[in-house]
Image (cartoon, rainbow, N blue to C red):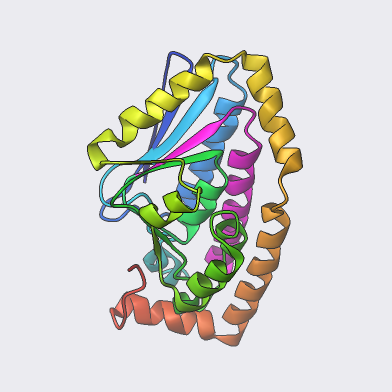
Amino acid sequence: MSIRCTIENHVAEVVMHHPPVNSITVADTWQIRDTFAELDRNPDVRVIILTAEGKGFNAGIDIKEMQSTPGFDHLLGSGEACYATFHQIYQTRVPVIAAVNDFCMGLGIGLVASCDMIIASNRARFGLPEVDNGALGCASHLAKLVAPMKLREMSLTCKPATAAELHAWGTVAYLTEPEELMPKAREIAGMILEKPPAAVEFAKAALNHLDVFEMHTNYRMEQGYTYQLNIMGTGDEQRDAFVRGDRVITR
């Protein structure tokens, strides 16, 4: 994956691009973490926009890469990378806006729920295909985006929700046409820039303290169940089926 980061007028734009569907590798994940850590240390940065180019915002973990690596090293490495990356985005001192252009699946849910605000095109959809893949993950983050019973439905059936649904629920702050996605994200970033920088940083810190969703802790619990499924062989079996093309996970 190519992770491009540009900074202009105190706004950083982090852009993911990995054709064909922006699935994410372990190295990709660490690169996103490192990019946000660097931006967090940069006093010139006051707002960050996380987005993607190409087909989809994020299709989740790169299953083909995982299945090409014997043993559990890749699975464990992916787990550590996701855990660190989500937490880094969440703890970044300045507001982070997710601009979601199309499908946002699996690991992508962890990315956007770790941000402070979501702007989405009307083509976007959000889902967790983890059970199809013999795994758990990011229900801890989806819980921040949908109502409790909707969380259960989406987790157990792997059925995604549309951006329009999330907008109606108040999760997506702004719903746009695809071509208006980035202009809207930049507009909102501009509104934040009009506020006193120290007050914005303190507000984000306070909001993190007020947050009732213990994503960081709960995600570790989900990872434990995923590792158990892999020891049982269920995870490997389902991922092999995906690589063979026996089923389609991303809907």
Residue extending farthest front: 168
Residue 51 in the figure: left or right of residue 217: left
Q: What is the x, y in percent for residue 1?
A: 36, 46
Residue 159 appears in the picture as rendered: yes
Q: What is the x, y in percent for residue 49?
A: 45, 32
**In this orientation, which residue lies closer to the viewer: 64 or 224?**
224
Residue 6 appears in the picture as rendered: no
Q: Quadrant of residue 158?
A: bottom left
**In this orientation, which residue lies closer to the viewer: 138 or 122?**
122
Q: What is the x, y in percent for residue 112?
A: 50, 47
Q: Which residue is drawn at the image coordinates 26% and 46% (left, top)?
A: 54
Q: Which residues are magenta?
A: 72-100
Q: Which residue is drawn at the image coordinates 45% and 67% (left, top)?
A: 66
Magenta stretch containing residue 90, yes or no? yes
Q: What is the x, y in percent for residue 9?
A: 43, 13
Q: Is residue 168 above or below residue 175?
A: below
Q: Is residue 143 above or below residue 188?
A: below
Q: Which residue is drawn at the image coordinates 59% and 33% (left, top)?
A: 37
Q: Which residue is drawn at the image coordinates 71% and 45% (left, top)?
A: 211
Secondary structure mostly taken by the magenta-highlighted segment of the chain:
helix
Residue extending farthest left: 179
Q: Is residue 125 above or below residue 53?
A: below
